[in-house]
């Protein structure tokens, strides 16, 4: 249909069985491989080159080109694939001195395993076997003398070039780790690594399509192209190729293989009478618009005819070699959130509705569609048309006007250097403590144990640069930013006036100094430096503007270059920092014991797990002072110099202790001195004295009855403290410290035992003191040194019985005094308590009986006194007599002429009492009639009332 000898584009994207076309864009890579061929052919060498590129980026096509070039140079060629089913035979038919090219192409199945499983692919037995075969195959061809048993005569196998085309996943992740003796350019046998440039700009895509079409054209078609009857891109148009490129890039697949597949699909559709719009709709680009409008809007390249949905633009055709004209075009694109690389043509590609690039007559041109006159008259092709912004939006067109407004606002804001630095800080994304610094500010944070400092500085004058350089030198020398210790520093320095080279020249001397003054490594290992002088400041602004515009438009954002530089610098610094990390494996034992064992192993020259970097750390610390240093200052120095936050089970004190235990530092009061015999002897004698001081444990507890003093001896065997140099001193010191640790544990154990015993005695004595406080006379029966629980219980029982006796006595004491008893219990107790066994139980039993008797006698006396009082009151009221009861009774009896006994009996009953004749007779011993006669007389004198007489 189109006068082709074969379909120019394979529907699957793979290379044709009979390949007529040439690869486009591999000039640099092919040149490197030709140099490899020449190196092998000129000498008598066998070499290995590795071509590295992701899946679908043309490794196989590059091998085709190498095969073609090698054949032209007289090479025999053997080509095979790295496959799970591959069998790499050693029996290669080769003539002596005849150059041979061996091509190894990674099969897709291997790429998939390596990409998905990475190192986990090594669990696949077939995969491992394939790797082993490849390694053996390559080693045999590179070193035939070592593989006589497989190859035979080694001199026949000279002038061999092996080219292996591999994906990064297989090469970097697996082969360089598993077979470093072969696949490592530094330590292995790789002569050259050729990394395929994975940029595929629009002009290269157009050239590839054009070359394919020409390669498979019949003579008839080629003749029409020469006559100008048809376009070399026919049956495609530039608009269609732009749309395909736009579609591939939107899908994230702007690589050769996917682009060739899209091109093949469109080619087939055209043969079937369909077009670009059908392909776009199949890919989900399906807005409500006509096919022609859809194609124009999605392609984003100018067209010639005005339409109702188009806008007028200026179309410029600018040669890539004209840097001045390109600079004007670049300014226009930057204002719209895009850029134009003036140094690398591989970065000049295509942006819908803005520009595209083409190679014409071997020269690269940029076609720019501008809405304003840029003053580039000699490159102006005239006015053309683009779809309007509102139509472009319907197919996902970019909001160019919004982007331009944002870019303009950011550009104005970034004229202020402080605003520019603040934006840089925001993009870096480090949150921490903000500090003021000369010419800018700093941010400090602890990032997963690494103390990081980020310095953002701006200088415009020489004196500012000088101050900034001095400030940086201070930070690097002191290892801190305003008191905040740093293990890694990132410096970001900008200037609107000074050139990058000028700033670098002023700062670079500080990078060659020792890090933190004492490391034997340059500052450059721990510092990443980004300088944007007047010659690079615009580039920085552009990167920040583009980044913000991409975020605003929700496009795939590419972070500014300095972010990668900071990350790389941080990783580089972290690798150096990790060299100074420590870890102590101590299990359940005490840390001091673990440190002693570690010091012993270090002195014996062995490698101690976790302490590999200790000797370096010790050397740095010893070089940090002359002869002596305060211990507190040394701990602070450790904290400043080394990443202590990353250490496990090790602190600053532990490093100081290790230096003591190794004898390199000797305590001398609060200071530490470098080893000298006199100081060492004093210190070890001090340790021996500490050991001897632990020979006896004494415990003393104060009690109300005196101090309880307990002691116990501990065996402290003789310590050998003799030494003649640092090593023997350290050994003697460690033995003494082990003994000291052991004795301290024993001392503490004994002390706790004695304290428990003393506490028990103290409790007994406190109970006993409560007894003696009341009954001091019992003290003569107590031996405080031999006091026991039985003794205390005995005395508490005696005191309890004595208390009981006193309680009984207090209850009856007043009765005893009333009835005239001569009993004195207090006096009796004082006497009894003077006896070892007071027999208080018997005394209390007798006291209880006596108390009963006294209480009865007391009650009788009270009754008699009551009756006597009643009688006197009655006699006084009836007869007017008082005084002594007997005298009063006699007087009343005389007045009434009645028996004195009867008068007394009636008087005792008192006023209002019922007078029973029989009871009175019994009480007085009178006869009944005598009582009746007497009561009658008493009635007559008014002493009693008759109604009361029974």
Image (cartoon, rainbow, N blue to C red):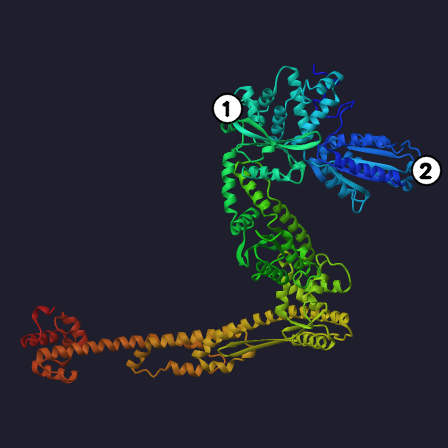
- Residue at figure coordinates x 62%, y 26% from the top left: 244
**Above or below, comparing residue 654 to residue 220 in the picture:** below
Name the residue nearer the viewer: 219 or 187. 219
Residue corresponding to mark 1: 309
**Helix, strand or loop under label 1:** loop
Spatial separation of the CA atoms under disc 2 and disc 1:
77 Å
For disc 1, the neighbor class at 10 Å (few under 14, some 14 to 19, many from 20) is some
Q: How many marks?
A: 2
Left or right of 402: which side holds 233?
A: right
458 is higher (above) or lower (below) than 406: below
Binning the other alpha carbons within 10 Å of mark 2 as few (below 14), some (14 to 19) or many (20 upward) gives few
Q: Position of residue 344 (x, y in %)?
A: 67, 39
Q: Please tell me which residue lies in front, 303 or 578.
A: 303
Residue drawn at the location 77% of the way across and 73% of the way down? 725
Residue 585 visible in the current orientation: no
The disc, 2 or 1, on the residue closer to the chain's N-terminal end is 2
The quadrant holding residue 237 is: top right
* Quadrant (top left/top right/bottom left/bottom right) for the C terminus: bottom left
Q: Is residue 28 visible?
A: yes
Q: Residue at x 78, y 35 (%)?
A: 30
Image quarter (top left, top right, bottom left or bottom right) of the N terminus: top right
Q: Would residue 944 appear left or right of 791 to someone viewing this image?
A: left
Q: Position of residue 526 (x, y in %)?
A: 66, 55
Which SS class for mark 2?
A: loop
Task: Give me the disc on residue 153.
Answer: 2
Residue shown at 60%/26% (left/top)?
A: 243
Residue 282 is tagged as none
């Amino acid at each position: 249909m189109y006068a082709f000898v074969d379909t120019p584009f394979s529907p699957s994207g793979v290379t044709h069985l009979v390949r007529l076309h040439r690869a486009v864009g591999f000039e640099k890579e092919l040149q490197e491989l030709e140099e490899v061929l020449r190196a092998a052919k000129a000498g008598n060498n066998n070499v290995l080159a590795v071509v590295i590129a992701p899946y679908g980026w043309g490794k196989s096509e590059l091998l085709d080109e190498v095969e073609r070039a090698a054949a032209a140079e007289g090479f025999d060629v053997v080509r095979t694939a790295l496959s799970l089913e591959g069998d790499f035979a050693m029996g290669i038919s080769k003539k002596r001195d005849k150059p041979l090219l061996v091509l190894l192409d990674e099969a897709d199945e291997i790429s998939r395993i390596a990409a998905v499983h990475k190192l986990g692919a090594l669990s696949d037995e077939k995969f491992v076997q394939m790797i082993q075969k490849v390694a053996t195959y390559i080693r045999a061809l590179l070193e035939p003398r070592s593989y006589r048993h497989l190859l035979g005569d080694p001199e026949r196998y000279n002038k061999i070039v092996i080219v292996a085309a591999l994906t990064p996943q297989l090469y970097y992740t697996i082969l360089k780790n598993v077979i470093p003796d072969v696949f490592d350019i530094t330590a292995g046998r790789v002569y050259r690594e050729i990394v395929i440039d994975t940029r595929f700009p629009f002009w290269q895509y157009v050239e590839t399509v054009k070359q394919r079409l020409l390669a498979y054209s019949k003579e008839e078609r080629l003749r029409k192209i020469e006559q100008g009857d048809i376009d070399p891109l026919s049956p495609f148009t530039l608009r269609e190729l732009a749309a395909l490129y736009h579609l591939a890039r939107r899908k994230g697949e702007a690589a050769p293989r996917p682009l060739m597949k899209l091109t093949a699909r469109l080619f087939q559709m055209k043969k079937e009478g369909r077009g670009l719009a059908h392909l776009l709709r199949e890919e989900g680009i399906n807005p409500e618009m006509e096919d022609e409008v859809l194609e124009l809007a999605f392609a984003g390249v100018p067209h010639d005819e005005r339409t109702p949905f188009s806008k007028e633009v200026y179309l410029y055709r600018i040669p890539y070699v004209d840097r001045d004209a390109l600079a004007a075009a670049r300014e226009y694109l930057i204002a719209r959130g895009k850029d134009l690389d003036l140094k690398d043509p591989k970065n000049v590609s295509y942006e819908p509705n803005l520009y595209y690039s083409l190679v014409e007559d071997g020269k690269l041109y940029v076609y720019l569609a501008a809405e304003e006159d840029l003053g580039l008259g000699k490159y102006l092709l005239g006015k053309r048309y683009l779809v309007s912004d509102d139509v472009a939006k319907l197919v996902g067109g970019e909001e160019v006007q919004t982007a331009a407004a944002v870019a303009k606002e950011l550009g104005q804001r970034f004229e202020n250097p402080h605003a520019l630095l603040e934006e840089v800080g925001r993009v870096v994304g480090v949150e921490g403590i903000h500090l003021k610094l000369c010419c800018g500010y700093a941010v400090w944070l602890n990032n997963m144990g690494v103390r990081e400092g980020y310095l953002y500085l701006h200088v415009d004058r020489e004196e500012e640069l000088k101050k900034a350089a001095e400030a940086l030198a201070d930070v690097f020398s002191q290892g801190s930013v305003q008191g905040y210790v740093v293990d890694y520093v990132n410096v970001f320095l900008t200037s609107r006036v000074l050139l990058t080279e000028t700033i670098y020249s002023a700062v670079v001397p500080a990078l060659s100094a020792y890090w933190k003054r004492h490391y034997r490594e340059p500052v450059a290992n721990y510092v990443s430096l980004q300088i944007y002088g007047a010659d690079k400041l615009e580039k920085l602004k552009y990167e920040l503007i583009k980044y913000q515009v991409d975020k605003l438009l929700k496009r795939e954002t590419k972070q500014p270059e300095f972010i990668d530089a900071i990350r790389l610098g941080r990783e580089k610094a972290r690798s150096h920092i990790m060299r100074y990390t420590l870890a102590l494996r101590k299990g359940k034992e005490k840390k001091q014991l673990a440190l002693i064992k570690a010091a012993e192993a270090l002195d014996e020259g062995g490698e101690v797990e976790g302490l590999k970097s200790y000797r370096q750390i010790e050397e740095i610390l010893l070089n940090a002072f002359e002869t002596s240093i305060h211990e507190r200052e040394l701990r602070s120095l450790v904290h400043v110099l080394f990443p202590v936050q990353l250490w496990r089970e090790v602190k600053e004190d532990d490093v100081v202790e290790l230096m003591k235990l190794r004898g390199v530092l000797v305590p001398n009061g609060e200071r530490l001195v470098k080893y000298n015999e006199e100081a060492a002897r004093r210190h070890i004698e001090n340790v021996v004295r500490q050991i001897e001081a632990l020979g006896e444990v004494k415990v003393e507890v104060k009690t109300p009855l005196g101090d309880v003093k307990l002691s116990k001896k501990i065996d402290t065997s003789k310590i050998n403290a003799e030494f003649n140099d640092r090593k023997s001193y350290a050994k003697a010191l460690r033995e003494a410290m082990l003994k000291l640790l052991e004795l301290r544990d024993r001392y503490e154990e004994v002390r706790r035992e004695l304290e428990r015993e003393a506490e028990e005695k103290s409790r007994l004595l406190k109970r006993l003191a409560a007894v003696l406080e009341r009954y001091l006379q019992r003290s003569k029966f107590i031996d405080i040194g031999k006091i026991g629980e039985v003794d205390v219980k005995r005395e508490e029982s005696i005191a309890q019985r004595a208390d009981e006796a006193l309680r009984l006595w207090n209850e009856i004491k007043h009765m005893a005094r009333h009835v005239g008893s001569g009993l004195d219990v207090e006096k009796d107790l004082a006497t009894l308590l003077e006896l070892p066994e007071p027999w208080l139980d018997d005394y209390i039993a007798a006291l209880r009986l006596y108390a009963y008797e006294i209480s009865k006698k007391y009650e009788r006396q009270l009754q008699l006194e009551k009756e006597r009082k009643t009688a006197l009151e009655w006699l006084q009221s009836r007869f007017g007599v008082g005084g002594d009861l007997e005298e009063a009774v006699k007087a009343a009896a005389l007045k009434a002429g009645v028996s004195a006994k009867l008068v007394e009996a009636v008087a005792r009953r008192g006023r209002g009492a019922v007078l029973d004749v029989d009871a009175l007779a019994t009480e007085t011993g009178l006869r009944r009639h005598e009582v009746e006669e007497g009561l009658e007389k008493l009635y007559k004198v008014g002493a009693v009332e008759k109604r009361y007489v029974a």
